[in-house]
Image (spheres, rainbow, N blue to C red):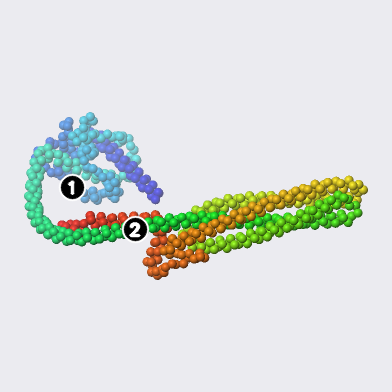
């Protein structure tokens, strides 16, 4: 639509240019006519000046167009060639000659035919520029050139061919303007000559007629008022009769309602007493229930911690056993290799006393190995016993878990505790990772030590082979004995340190296991006491725990849906104290509101019937 808007803008600009050109052409044409007709002192299309006639009844607006006198005494006349035309014929001519384009322009720019805004070409130009005329009309000042001869004939013909239609339209509009100005001048003359009196008599007659019609209307309105007053009196009498009857009825109803209110107040007092007793009982039960829930949560948290400790201890025991088995296999392989080497050395001819000492040391090491194997067997037996104890504890925990499963529905608030446990588990996982790193470091140290020992054994083999071949055997054997003694001492010291560390770890694990057993026994005793207390205090409750921890119904549940709904509401009220307090406050407020409504309100029929009668 942008191109359409541009076309419309261009068309408007062309129309404005055409209007300006036609106006300029008309002005130039008027100026040329004035120059050609300088002999005649009157206006180009005006009439000869005549004195203003005093007999205004005989004059008409269409037959003669007289002039009016300005402040300076000059007489101006409207155009003369429009006098013979009637307004009906002129309107027909205008309707015939007007085009759709001019209609569109007249809709956009309506002409206001007033004396202050009418052009001076239609009335007549003034000679003096200083003074204004009677109606504030100033002299037209032409901005375009006045010489008509300066413009070439070719341009004028071209413009007049393009502007014939608009000139005709403008002429029609000028004719209409001249007619309206002549009518205005005639009215002014009538006003100056005293035509106001005739209009005044006509207006007086009209006012008399209006007064007579208004008196008739006033009489009719008075009759209507009298009829309405009589109807109002009748309605008032009916309303008074109805109100008296209704008041008596309402008094009887109020007395009945007062008796009902007294009965309801007594019932309300009884219900309030019952509610207070029930609230006290419920608060006591709730406090005991909250204590038990807190203790159960604490017990579950401790049980979870103990289970985690047991899992960690069992994992550490398994790791230690695996490490011990691997270490034992490595030591066995090393001892077997040493035994084979000793046998080969004993079979040889060049055996010295130092080798015998080494053999004795090896025998002592074998004895220590046997002792260590016996200690490992003992540790295995103890670990088996610990596993049995752990299994027993797991059985006890499973039994306690069955008992706790019945109360899991009431313990949904454990999410916060679970989050805390997750944080603790993360911390424990970090600790386990650190322990794994430490164990990895120890395993790496053991591997390095074994590699060193293997290198030493290879070195010993090389030295033994060199002893057989060389002649200087005494010196080499002495050096070998010194090195072997230092190596054996280091090995014995390292093995003793590792055994002491492992025994310390085993002792700490046993102590932790004993502590866990003691804590489990305490928790079991507390749990049994709590279950007994719950059975004693909540004998009227719906759920009763068996010895195995399974819930069973104490009383027969109703089959109807209302019974189930009431049971659920009771459970919700027991679990949520805020909801219970809200319901109590709601009941009290509802009773109070009902009482205030009954005491203060009036029935709707008492208020609505009089309004309907009106």
- Label 2 crowding class (10 Å Cα cut-off): few <14, some 14-19, many 20+? few
The reply to whether residue 525 is visible in this rendering is yes
Question: Which residue is at a point 27% across and 59% down the rendered structure image?
Answer: 266
Give how far apart the Cα atoms at labels 2 and 1 are.
101 Å
Q: Which mark is residue 204?
A: none
On the image, the x and y values in percent for residue 168 come to 27, 45
Is 72 rendered above or below residue 448?
above
On the image, the x and y values in percent for residue 608 come to 19, 58
The outermost residue toward the right is: 471
Question: Which residue is at a point 45% across and 55% down the rendered structure image?
Answer: 290
Dot 2 falls on a residue whose secondary structure is helix
Q: Which mark is residue 87?
A: 1
The quarter of the rendered structure image containing the C terminus is bottom left
Looking at the picture, tell me which residue is in the foreground, 536 or 2: 536
Q: Is residue 312 left or right of residue 146?
A: right
Residue beneath label 2, please?
275
Dot 1 falls on a residue whose secondary structure is helix
On the image, the x and y values in percent for residue 355 come to 86, 51
Is 355 rendered above or below residue 560?
above
Residue 65 figure quarter: top left
Are discs 2 and 1 less than 8 Å apart at CB? Answer: no
Q: Is residue 215 left or right of residue 39?
A: left
The reply to whether residue 462 is visible in this rendering is no
Question: Which residue is at a point 62% across and 53% down the rendered structure image?
Answer: 511
Residue 237 figure quarter: bottom left
Counting the numbered discs, the total is 2
Question: Which residue is at a point 34% across and 38% down the rendered structure image?
Answer: 152
Judged by depth in the image, the label closer to the viewer, 2 or 1, is: 2
């Amino acid at each position: 639509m942008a191109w359409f808007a541009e076309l419309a803008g261009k068309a408007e600009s062309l129309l404005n240019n055409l209007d300006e050109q036609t106006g300029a052409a008309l002005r130039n044409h008027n100026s040329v006519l004035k120059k050609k007709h300088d002999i005649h002192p009157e206006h180009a299309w005006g009439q000869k000046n005549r004195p203003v006639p005093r007999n205004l009844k005989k004059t008409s607006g269409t037959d003669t167009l007289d002039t009016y006198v300005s402040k300076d005494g000059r007489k101006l006349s409207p155009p003369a060639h429009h006098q013979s035309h009637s307004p009906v014929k002129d309107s027909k001519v205008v309707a015939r000659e007007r085009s759709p384009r001019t209609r569109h322009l007249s809709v956009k720019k309506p002409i206001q035919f007033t004396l202050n805004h009418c052009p001076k070409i239609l009335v007549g130009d003034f000679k003096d520029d200083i003074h204004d005329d009677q109606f504030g009309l100033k002299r037209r000042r032409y901005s375009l050139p006045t010489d008509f001869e300066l413009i070439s004939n070719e341009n004028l013909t071209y413009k007049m061919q393009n502007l014939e239609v608009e000139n005709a339209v403008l002429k029609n509009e000028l004719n209409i303007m001249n007619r309206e100005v002549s009518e205005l001048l005639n009215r002014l003359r009538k006003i100056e000559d005293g035509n106001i009196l005739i209009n005044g008599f006509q207006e007086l007659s009209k006012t008399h007629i209006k007064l007579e019609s208004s008196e008739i209307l006033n009489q009719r309105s008075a009759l209507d008022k009298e009829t309405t007053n009589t109807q109002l009196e009748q309605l008032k009498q009916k309303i008074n009769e109805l109100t008296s009857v209704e008041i008596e009825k309402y008094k009887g109803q109020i007395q009945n309602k007062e008796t009902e209110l007294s009965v309801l107040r007594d019932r309300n007092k009884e219900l309030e007493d019952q509610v207070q007793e029930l609230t006290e009982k419920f608060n006591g039960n709730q406090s005991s229930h909250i204590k038990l829930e807190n203790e159960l949560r604490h017990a579950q948290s401790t049980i979870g911690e103990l289970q985690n400790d047991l899992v960690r201890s069992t994992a550490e025991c398994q790791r230690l056993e695996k490490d011990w088995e691997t270490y034992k296999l490595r030591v066995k392989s090393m001892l077997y290799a040493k035994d084979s080497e000793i046998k080969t050395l004993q079979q040889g001819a060049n055996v010295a006393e130092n080798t015998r000492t080494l053999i004795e040391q090896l025998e002592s090491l074998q004895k220590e190995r046997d002792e260590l194997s016996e200690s490992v067997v003992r540790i295995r037996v103890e670990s088996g016993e610990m596993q049995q104890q752990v299994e027993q504890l797991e059985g006890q925990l499973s039994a306690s878990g069955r008992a706790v499963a019945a109360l899991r529905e009431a313990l949904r608030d454990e999410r916060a505790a679970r989050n805390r446990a997750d944080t603790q588990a993360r911390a424990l996982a970090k600790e386990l990772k650190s322990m794994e790193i430490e164990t990895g470091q120890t395993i790496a140290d053991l591997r390095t030590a074994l590699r060193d020992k293997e290198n030493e054994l290879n070195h010993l083999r090389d030295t033994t082979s060199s002893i057989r071949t060389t002649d200087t055997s005494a010196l080499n054997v002495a050096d070998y004995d010194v090195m072997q003694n230092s190596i054996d001492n280091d090995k014995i010291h390292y093995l003793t340190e590792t055994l002491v560390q492992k025994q310390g770890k085993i002792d700490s694990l046993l102590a932790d296991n004993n502590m866990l057993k003691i804590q489990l026994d305490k928790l079991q005793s507390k749990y049994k006491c709590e279950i007994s207390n719950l059975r004693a205090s909540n004998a009227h409750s719906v759920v009763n725990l068996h010895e195995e921890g399974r819930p069973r119904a104490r009383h027969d549940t109703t089959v109807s849906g209302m019974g189930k709904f009431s049971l659920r509401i009771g459970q919700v009220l027991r679990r949520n104290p805020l909801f219970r307090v809200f319901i109590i406050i709601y009941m009290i407020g509802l009773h109070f509101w009902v009482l205030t409504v009954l005491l203060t309100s009036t029935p709707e029929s008492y208020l609505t019937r009089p309004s309907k009668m009106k």
